[in-house]
Amino acid sequence: MSHWTTADIPRQDGKLAIVTGANSGIGLHAARELARAGCTVILACRSAEKSNSTRQRIVQEIPTALVEDAVLDLASLSSIRDFATAFLATRRPLDLLINNAGVMALPKRQLTADGFELQIGTNHLGHFALTGLLLPALLAASSARIVTVSSLAHRDGKIRLDDLQWERDYKPWPAYRQSKLANLLFGKELERRLLKAGVPTQSNIVHPGIASTSLFRNGPGSGGGLKNAIFPIVIALLGQSEEQGALPTLYAATAPEAQGGHYYGPDGFREMKGYPVEVKNEAQADDPALAAKLWELSEKLTGVHYDFSAASSRNK
Ligand SMILES: NC(=O)c1ccc[n+]([C@@H]2O[C@H](COP(=O)([O-])OP(=O)(O)OC[C@H]3O[C@@H](n4cnc5c(N)ncnc54)[C@H](OP(=O)(O)O)[C@@H]3O)[C@@H](O)[C@H]2O)c1
């Protein structure tokens, strides 16, 4: 059986993508391969320095790459609004939005600028707000795709509707699992709403398996102690490369056969490594009642309300 690789990415000339967390790990490799395929890629990073040096790095490797710098801090609603306002002012249709940036299992409870627990705030609420604000540009493209990066860790996740911010009894891993289950619930609920609006825009979800990226050093690895120091080393031995970890994202973003609402990840042992295929999520990620409650809460917390009306009028 032949595997899907970057060689299978169809040409993306004329398309425009935004990749969050494009300066590192999976986001960097996804951005670079989209650019190699001819896509114009906006590198949305949390500082101008990171975005700028990433652009230079990509252009050095691919001189024809069309890559642009941008500053986006997903842990700040005002940064998200500034980014979206500046982008919408350009009136460019957006073909691809890759909701990739993330933080994992932070040893101590930290907060975003708006007082959200940092993992749910960055991984879910930040991307929820960003996608909602960019919706007009996504609906203006002929068949846009939104790819949201979840994790194997969603499996034991619980959404604490009564304490989403972990004000009680913070635990690093359950807080991460909650945020990654939220990514799946969001991606699937968004697809249902896009379908209802009758537009060709797709929302699909991926996980990278286990890829040896900075996520482990910056998250659990930052906690001190022998166990935390060894953790990134074990991951490096068990997991796959960053490049390979970016394949499900690239598949979901570009493969003609990838479908809205579906979930893609690696095909190897326990989905830890391998090549992209459709994979199964845990049943609770398909619970529309839970997804609707999370959506409502996310709207309330971020103040971002999705407006599909542009889509409805386009399809009349
Ligand atoms: N690696 C894995 O095995 C694995 C497994 C399952 C899921 N994932 C998911 O894959 C995604 C990418 O992670 P990765 O493994 O590639 O880790 P990574 O190398 O640490 O990349 C994470 C990216 O997110 C960015 N980021 C963090 N907080 C941000 C914020 N507030 N605003 C904007 N950008 C922010 C980081 O920017 P800075 O460089 O500024 O920190 C970095 O560019 C995450 O959603 C993660 O949950 C990874």
Image (cartoon, rainbow, N blue to C red):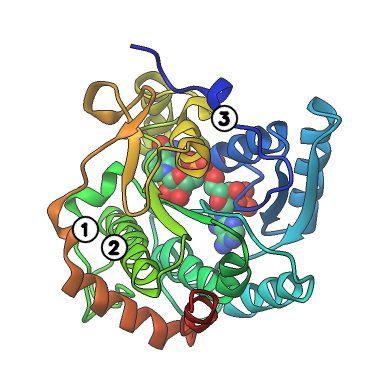
In the displayed structure image, the side of residue 289 where residue 240 appears, left or right: right
* Relative side of 194 to 253, left or right: left
Asked whether mark 2 lies closer than 8 Å to ligand 1, one says no
Q: Position of residue 277 (x, y in %)?
A: 33, 31
Residue occupied by mark 1: 285
Q: Which residue is mark 2?
A: 185
Name the residue rendered at 81%, 48% in the picture: 52
Nearest the viewer among 239 and 34 is 34
Question: Along the polypeptide, which appears first: circle 2 or circle 3?
Answer: 3
Mark 3 surroundings within 10 Å by alpha-carbon count, few (fewer than 14), some (14 through 19), many (20 or more)? some
Q: Is residue 222 visible?
A: no
Q: Quarter of the image holding residue 257?
A: top left
- Vertical placement of residue 138 versus 98, above or below: below
Locate residue 108: give its quadrant.
Answer: bottom left
Q: Alpha carbon of mark 2 to alpha carbon of mark 3: how far?
A: 27 Å
Amino acid type of the residue tagged 1 in the rendering: Ala
Q: Which numbered disc, 1 or 3, marks the residue that appears first in the sequence?
A: 3
Q: Quadrant of the N terminus?
A: top left
Residue occupying the far left of the picture: 283
Q: Are marks 2 and 3 in contact (CB under 8 Å)?
A: no
- Where's residue 304, x and y in %? 49, 83
Q: Which residue is mark 3?
A: 9
Q: Position of residue 127 (x, y in %)?
A: 49, 65
Characterize the local packing of mark 2: few (<14), some (14-19) or many (20 or more) Cα atoms within 10 angstroms. Answer: many
Which residue corresponds to the image point at 31% horizontal and 66% vertical from the top-left?
A: 192
Under tag 1, what secondary structure?
helix
Which residue is at 70% across, 51% downward? 43
Task: Name the amino acid, label 3.
Answer: Ile
Residue 8: which disc? none
